């Protein structure tokens, strides 16, 4: 543990021998499905005529929404919602791209041909597209009896009114975080095989969990959970939350297989993915913040409108509540008021997406900190310092009930400031602003990643930029920006990154009196299995459904540590099967839970197996089991590494000669362990919740320059400092940080889901939905501190989402700083920056 | 696009294949589902993500933008042809060393593009590497480790004189 060993996943993937679901053929002869989708954002479906399609060559059958609804119940929602959600539209279509009918044929080409022959009579209805309008309208508009607002809750912690009254500075501002999507490179894939003999469904899907959704799927299909066998493939091509939504297609394909009586399969294409898989919520937040004259943040009031799209699809409105215990960020704030409205619109339903509610929450908070610093005439770093929780304040109970485990926030901030060369850059910036004389200081980049920009707005240059011969020990930006009038900006963001989510937090969307009626939900648990075969080989089974993060590598490490083996002596399986693996509803790959709880389950199973081996060895070694040490494949007495007995021998004994085992040793060398994160009680009657078990800390500092002629944004330097507790595998941790940063950089600078005023999707291909490429993502300098979490078994915290939360804020702060403006819209594309500069009179002609 | 089936003769990774296909069958589908060479991936089918990149007579092409019939008579290399049974291609080794893949879905296409580009420009600058990679989407790695891997390979190869 703690070593950056090579990934066991890599060789097969590099050879092209990965096993992604579309590569596999679990049911030979399965028919290929294509979906007929609504071109309208909102329309009544008057009729669906499938006759011509059903008779087309190669077609095995066509299934409509009405047929599906005859065998399925609506998908269960987290809170009551009177717009029922079926995976095929029933009665009306509520967003452009919604599936309306499914065609199964011998191959995909024929299925798509036949799809064009399905005649759907639509009566277009007025679409509801603006979340703020949705927050204000009633029943008729959305076609839902109780209107577009599906949850409206207020929360009060402490005495926010009095705190605002006492504040010397009160800032209020509106922030809008637009829709975007993690858009993994591999799209969804499902194979479904209904067995009429025992009325069961076996489904293969590149689903990512959480397995709460297995229950949702089984209920929708009208099956006991034991009759829905769900299998995930060994490899999955990224997910970033999005593939939780595959559950809708598990139900759709399951119903099609059942109705037509044939096995079916479907691989999503990119336009289907961008139109109708899932995306992050758009959130509009009015944030009010009260400060004392010395810059103490006294109180916060969030008034939030969250757009979840056309249906309230489980686990939404979790995006809104994931951060509920963390609404005060990294700061000591006692008084907090919240109003949360969840609204439906005629746009694609939302769901899990890397950062999950964090980017939407931190943009208001961290922009407000920057604005407050300016009003208070304090440096933003100084304002942060005055409000950050101190290392001696942990564990810290937040105003809304969150429990922060550990951290040294001030040390991280200091690390970041030192690494970026903060004082120096501020001086450079001041010189540039005062129009001081340009010094002959040539910026020297070492030539990294400074390619042309597809996005047109963003260019990255490597962090190491310095005056020639001027040597920078800090490696930061030294000597940039002396020339008169350069637009340099520095942006800071401090974020707390929750990981290992409480399965109960989303019930906050219901008031306490309604929560009391239902089954309380809490906790986050995971299972893993470790087995030793008769020759001493070790296999591990995970229920964490990795999508590229390297879980197999880390599990091999932690298991090897317990058993005294090398990681390469441990085989870890990543494919998952609800009918042969141990799992819980919280199993799966989300809320950065692997290092906190997933690896811990594997470690715990291995520890129990090691205990068993120690007991067997103790008889041979004539010592107490607690004196047996497992090392280098042998069991020996502590302090006497030379003697001892091999694990292979012990394994052989356990398998072949169970009669010889000590009486108190359980037979068999297979152990399944369940572990559960502590402190994650259901929300209490005061609406307080520990929404996550572990809390990492991230400080980002971005240094940007905006070209006064072209409005082009360049990131000159970017430093991120993480404290994610114990790092299980530093290189994989850095990989998560880099990937997470790219997912924050995207919506900050170019990624945005756009609909026109009719509700038609304008970003339906990768030509229009602009994911950053290697030419745009700037280099990132990563530093770590390791303050172990007292709440997770291995001391580790998640770190796969922090920079997705922080980067939009840090970059927005930097751009606003560069331009001297208070507001900027995300994504900060060249036209948006241009417009802001035009208004401010900053544009210069050649 | 429908029409009578036609015969396609190709040499893929040194093996000869003769198949009868519909004219509209994409080269990517042909490789994956007809020949079972599933190492070539499909991420968009509109020429942006680069996951489907293969070499057609040595040139990197997007197999989702070609029909199988267009490859008739040509030599194709896919990712499965890069390594031999014993060991990885040194570029693949460099990817492993630099943690240049996570889910690995984008990797095959990037490797094939890089092989083509490095033949034309054996020692690219980091800018040039970023430029070559800008035809590929990777959502996992943030690209930096991929740039590192290609750079280290190009420079390592030059120093040890293994190339040319
Ligand atoms: S699948 Fe060919 S470029 Fe994306
Ligand atoms: S490694 Fe997952 S998309 Fe590149």
Image: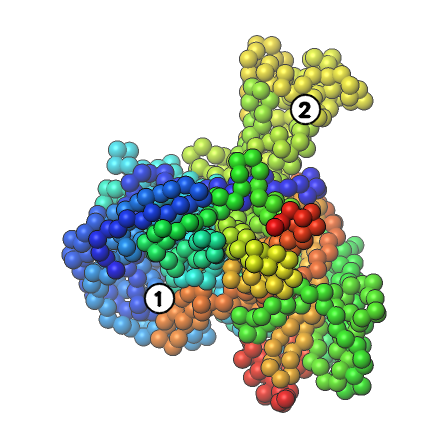
Instruction: Give percent across and percent down for residue A144.
Output: 33, 66
Q: Which label belongs to residue A95?
A: 1
The residue at the far front in this view is: B164
In the image, A238 versus A596, the foreground residue is A238
Instruction: Give percent across and percent down for residue A526.
Output: 55, 40
Instruction: Give percent across and percent down for residue A759.
Output: 37, 72
**Quick check: A817 above or below A196?**
below
The residue at the far top in this view is: A659
Q: CA distance from mark 2 to mark 1?
A: 59 Å
**Where the N terminus of chain A falls, by quadrant?**
top right
In the image, A146 versus B155, the foreground residue is B155
Mark 2 element type: loop
Q: Is residue A623 visible?
A: yes
Chain ID of residue with mark 1: A
Q: Quadrant of ligand 1?
A: bottom left
Instruction: Please tell me which residue is depicted at 75% across the width and 82% down the height of the picture.
Output: A483
Mark 1 element type: loop
Chain ID of residue with mark 2: A
Q: Which residue is mark 2?
A: A633
Q: Residues within 10 Å of mark 1 (few under 14, many from 20)?
A: many
**First in sequence: mark 2 or mark 1?**
1
- Do the numbered discs 2 and 1 sit on residues whose CB atoms are within 8 Å? no
Q: Residues within 10 Å of mark 2 (few under 14, many from 20)?
A: some
Which of labels 2 and 1 is toward the front? 2
- The answer to whether residue A563 is left or right of residue A139 is right
**Where the C terminus of chain A falls, by quadrant?**
bottom right
**Quick check: A754 above or below B78?**
below
Instruction: Please tell me which residue is depicted at 80% across the width and 86% down the height of the picture.
Output: A437
């Amino acid at each position: 543990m703690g070593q950056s060993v090579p990934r066991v996943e890599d060789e097969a993937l590099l050879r092209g021998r990965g096993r992604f679901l579309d590569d596999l053929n679990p049911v030979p002869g399965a028919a290929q499905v294509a979906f007929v989708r609504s071109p309208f954002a909102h329309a009544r479906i008057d009729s669906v005529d499938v006759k011509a399609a059903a008779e087309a060559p190669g077609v095995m059958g066509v299934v409509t929404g009405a047929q599906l609804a005859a065998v399925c119940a609506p998908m269960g929602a987290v809170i009551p919602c009177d717009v029922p959600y079926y995976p095929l539209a029933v009665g009306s279509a509520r967003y452009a791209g919604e599936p309306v009918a499914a065609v199964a044929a011998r191959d995909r080409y024929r299925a798509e041909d036949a799809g064009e022959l399905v005649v759907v009579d639509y009566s277009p209805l007025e679409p509801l597209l603006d979340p703020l309008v949705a927050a204000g309208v009633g029943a008729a508009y959305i076609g839902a009896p109780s209107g577009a607002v599906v949850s409206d809750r207020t929360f009060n912690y402490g005495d926010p009114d009095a705190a605002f009254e006492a504040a010397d500075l009160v800032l209020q501002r509106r922030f809008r975080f637009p829709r975007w999507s993690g858009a993994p490179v591999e799209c969804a894939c499902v194979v479904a095989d209904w067995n009429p003999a025992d009325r069961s469904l076996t489904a293969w899907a590149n689903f990512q969990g959480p397995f709460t959704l297995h229950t949702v799927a089984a209920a929708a299909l009208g099956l006991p959970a034991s009759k829905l066998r769900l299998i995930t493939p060994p490899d999955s091509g990224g997910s970033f939350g999005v593939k939780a939504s595959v559950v809708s297609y598990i139900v759709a394909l399951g119903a099609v297989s059942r109705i037509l009586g044939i096995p079916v399969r479907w691989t999503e294409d990119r336009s289907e993915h961008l139109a109708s898989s899932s995306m992050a919520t758009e959130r509009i937040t009015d944030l009010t913040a009260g400060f004392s004259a010395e810059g103490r943040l006294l109180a916060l009031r969030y008034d939030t409108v969250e757009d979840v799209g056309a249906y309230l699809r489980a686990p939404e409105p979790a995006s809104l509540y994931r951060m509920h215990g963390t609404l005060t960020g990294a700061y000591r704030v006692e008084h907090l008021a919240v109003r949360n409205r969840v609204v439906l619109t005629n746009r694609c339903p939302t769901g899990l997406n890397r950062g999950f509610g964090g980017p939407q929450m931190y943009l208001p908070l961290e922009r407000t900190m920057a604005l407050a610093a300016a009003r208070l005439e304090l440096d933003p770093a100084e304002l942060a310092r005055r409000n950050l929780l101190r290392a001696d304040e942990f564990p810290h109970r937040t105003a809304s009930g969150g429990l922060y485990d550990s951290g040294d926030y001030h040390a991280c901030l200091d690390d970041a400031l030192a690494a970026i060369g903060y004082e120096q850059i501020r001086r450079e910036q001041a010189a540039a602003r005062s129009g001081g004389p340009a010094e002959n200081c040539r910026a020297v980049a070492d030539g990294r990643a400074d390619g042309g920009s597809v996005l047109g707005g963003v260019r990255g240059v490597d962090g190491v930029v310095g005056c020639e011969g001027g040597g920078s020990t800090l490696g930061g930006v030294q000597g940039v920006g002396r020339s008169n009038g350069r637009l340099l900006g520095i942006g800071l963001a401090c974020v707390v990154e929750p990981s290992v989510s409480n399965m109960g937090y989303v019930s906050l969307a219901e008031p306490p009196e309604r929560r009391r009626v239902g089954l309380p939900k809490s906790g986050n648990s995971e299972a893993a299995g470790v087995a030793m075969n008769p020759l001493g080989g070790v296999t591990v089974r995970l229920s964490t459904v990795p999508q590229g993060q390297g879980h197999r590598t880390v599990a091999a490490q932690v298991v090897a540590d317990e058993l005294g083996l090398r990681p390469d002596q441990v085989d870890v399986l990543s494919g998952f099967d609800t009918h042969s693996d141990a799992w819980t509803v919280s199993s799966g790959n989300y809320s950065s839970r692997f290092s906190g709880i997933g690896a811990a389950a594997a470690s715990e199973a291995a520890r129990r197996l090691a205990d068993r081996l120690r007991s067997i060895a103790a008889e041979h070694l004539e010592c107490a089991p607690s004196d047996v040490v497992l090392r280098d494949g042998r069991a020996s007495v502590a302090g006497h590494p030379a003697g001892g007995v091999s694990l292979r021998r012990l394994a052989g004994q356990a398998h072949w000669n169970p009669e010889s085992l000590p009486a108190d040793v359980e037979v068999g060398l297979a152990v399944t362990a369940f572990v559960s994160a502590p402190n994650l009680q259901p929300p209490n009657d005061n609406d307080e919740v520990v929404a996550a078990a572990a809390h990492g800390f991230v400080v980002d500092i971005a240094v940007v320059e905006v070209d006064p002629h072209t409005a082009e944004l360049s990131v000159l330097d970017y430093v991120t400092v993480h404290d994610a507790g114990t790092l299980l595998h530093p290189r994989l941790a850095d990989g998560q940080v880099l990937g997470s940063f790219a997912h924050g950089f995207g919506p900050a600078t170019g990624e945005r889901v756009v609909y026109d005023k009719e509700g038609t999707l304008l970003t339906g291909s990768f030509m229009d939905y602009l994911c950053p490429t290697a030419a745009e993502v700037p280099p990132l300098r990563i530093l770590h501190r390791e303050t172990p979490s007292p709440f997770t078994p291995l001391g580790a915290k998640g770190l796969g989402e922090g920079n997705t939360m922080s980067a939009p804020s840090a970059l927005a702060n930097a751009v606003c700083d560069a331009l001297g403006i208070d507001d900027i819209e995300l994504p900060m594309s060249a036209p948006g920056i241009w417009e802001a500069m035009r208004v401010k009179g900053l544009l210069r002609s050649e | 696009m429908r029409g009578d089936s036609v015969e396609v003769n190709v040499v893929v990774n040194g093996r000869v294949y003769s198949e009868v296909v519909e004219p509209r069958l994409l080269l990517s589908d042909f490789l994956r589902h007809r020949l079972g060479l599933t190492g070539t991936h499909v991420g968009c089918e509109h020429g942006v993500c680069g996951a489907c990149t293969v070499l057609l007579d040595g040139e990197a092409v997007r197999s989702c933008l070609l029909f199988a019939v267009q490859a008739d008579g040509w030599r194709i290399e896919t990712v499965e042809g890069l390594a031999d049974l014993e060991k990885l291609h040194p570029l693949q080794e460099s990817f492993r060393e630099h943690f240049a893949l996570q889910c690995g879905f984008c990797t095959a296409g990037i490797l094939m593009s890089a092989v083509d580009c490095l033949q034309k420009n054996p020692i690219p600058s980091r800018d040039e590497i970023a430029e070559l990679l800008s035809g590929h989407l990777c959502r996992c790695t943030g690209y930096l480790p991929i740039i590192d891997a290609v750079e280290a390979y190009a420079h390592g190869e030059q120093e040890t004189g293994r190339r040319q």
